Amino acid sequence: MSAYSSEDVRDVEALAQGIHRITKGNWTVMEVCGGQTHAILKNGIDQLLPPAIRIVHGPGCPVCVTSMEVLDRAMEIASRDDVVLCTYGDMLRVPGTKTDLARIRSQGGKIRVIHSPLDACKVASEELRLGTGRQVVLFAIGFETTAPATAMAVRAAHMKSLPNFSVLVSHVLVPPALQAILSDPDHGIDGILAAGHVCAITGYEAYEGIADQYRTPIAVTGFSPVDILRGMLAVVTELESSKGDTSRHTRVINAYSQVVERCGNVAARRALDEVFECCDQVWRGMGTLPQSGFKLRSKYQALDATERFASETSSIACPALPTIQSHCRAAEVLKGKIRPTQCEAFGKECTPAYPLGAPMVSNEGACAAYYHHQSRNDPDVLGGSSR
Amino acid sequence: MADTVAADTVTVAADLGVLSMCLAVPGRILSVESLSGLRMGVVDFGGVTQEVCLEYTPEAGVGDYVIVHVGIAISKLDPTRAADSLSTFQEISALPGRP
Ligand code: SF4
């Protein structure tokens, strides 16, 4: 933990001790954020907790839950000669039905890695200025944290009347996914750490209903080891103190109050509401969840890439992916049913260099996080494992 | 306080790569300007500066810390609220022990 100050180390120790002191029951706590998955494994936070507390990882990696259908759509669009597809670097190696974006790029597909949706607007302006005649498509994925940035790009393109800009929207919303997980009678989850930066946008009113309905306490949690342990302490405190008391209201605790307010970010929510409306959405590994995604409102319909490129005219032939993904257990990993190390392919056929499934591609994916960090915490899970 | 938070998250961000999707990083606003109708600013992330859209944090000005995700500030970091949660943490010592 060299990057952390001695104050942080002291706080981590005090929080871990606090958790040890109050824990009496056996509790399974799910986090739903790729950044937290990574931070937990990197810092060995799971090792600091009492053995009675088990952390499981939910569908917190946006790259991992992006549906095959929309990925295939993006690849079709990126295969056109007259298109520049702008997206995040993590998307390039996620396997679709037949191929991935990286392969399309190596065959001449014009794919630009962006750091912000606003970059896609800049690319569109530039293509326009140069008179290339190319269309620029923003492949917009991500949770509620990222959707306001997409909304900003849509508004900017609309304001500037950029004729060559469109967006392939595939945003997903966390609360419906939590609801889907908790409605499974065998979910086995006692408490939830909610992703702090998602809540920075949305606030946590929606989580209050879920906590109460499923009697599952939720702590809004940040990303540093101190933040994560503070969230964990809040959830365990709630679990221990409400044990056996069925009359009690199950709460959401804001353990990341320096960043998150109950109502979220009002300006960003307003922009989301202006640009998008909720729709049913397909999640990779979880199926179609009602009202769990965004689509453009009719005012911005003209910027919808799905409509603009309705007729498929792929001009780049692409080599197919060599591997079949039949043993990939991503669906169970994403629901917290198994740990990545319980997948037979983990660390053998499936590695970050040759990923079989999305959770091994993205650094935020649970399989990649275990691959990179678990070796240090638990040496027998990697490579040489005979299981 | 804000600086430690920044250091923490920047470390995680560096591990995940700049393209990390759900991670957001705190930085300090150095300047604010209007660029083609958008409120933009230059933000310092522990020595690396970047242009950031400040439309969603109208209350944040020069010197404030904001949490930035894919080029957009999503929240103004409020160190006083952080101090609040740290003091709740001091209540840990008052937690009940094992029976
Ligand atoms: S280890 Fe690979 S094959 Fe197994 S679930 Fe994860 S991504 Fe799929």
Image: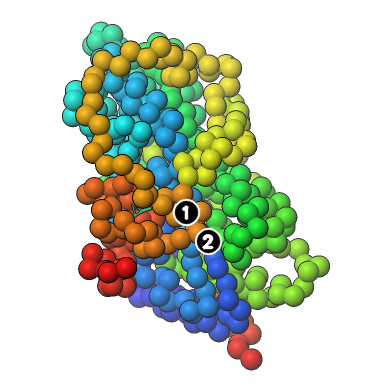
- In the displayed structure, would residue A97 be above or below residue B60? above
Q: Residues within 10 Å of mark 1 (few under 14, many from 20)?
A: some
Amino acid found under the numbered disc labelled 1: Glu
Q: Residue at x 26, y 53 (%)?
A: A349
Q: Residues within 10 Å of mark 2 (few under 14, many from 20)?
A: many
Left or right of B60 in this view: A313: left
- The image's mark for residue A332 is 1
Q: Residue at x 22, y 68 (%)?
A: A384
Q: Residue at x 50, y 70 (%)?
A: A54
Amino acid found under the numbered disc labelled 2: Met
Left or right of A197 in this view: A322: left
Q: Secondary structure at mark 1?
A: helix
- In the displayed structure, would residue B77 be above or below residue A284? below
Q: Nearer the viewer, residue A25 or A381?
A: A381
- In the displayed structure, would residue A221 be above or below residue A292? below
Question: Where on the picture, by quarter, is residue B95?
Answer: bottom right
From the image, tell me which residue sits under label 2: A30
Left or right of A80 in this view: A179: right
Question: Where on the picture, by quarter, is residue B43?
Answer: top left
Say which chain tag 2 marks.
Answer: A
Residue A156 in view: no
**Does the beta carbon of the residue at mark 1 sit less than 8 Å from ligand 1?**
yes
Q: Nearer the viewer, residue A266 or A347?
A: A347
Q: Which quarter of the rendering shows the C terminus of chain A?
A: bottom left
Query: What x and y, as percent, mark residue A187?
Result: 59, 59
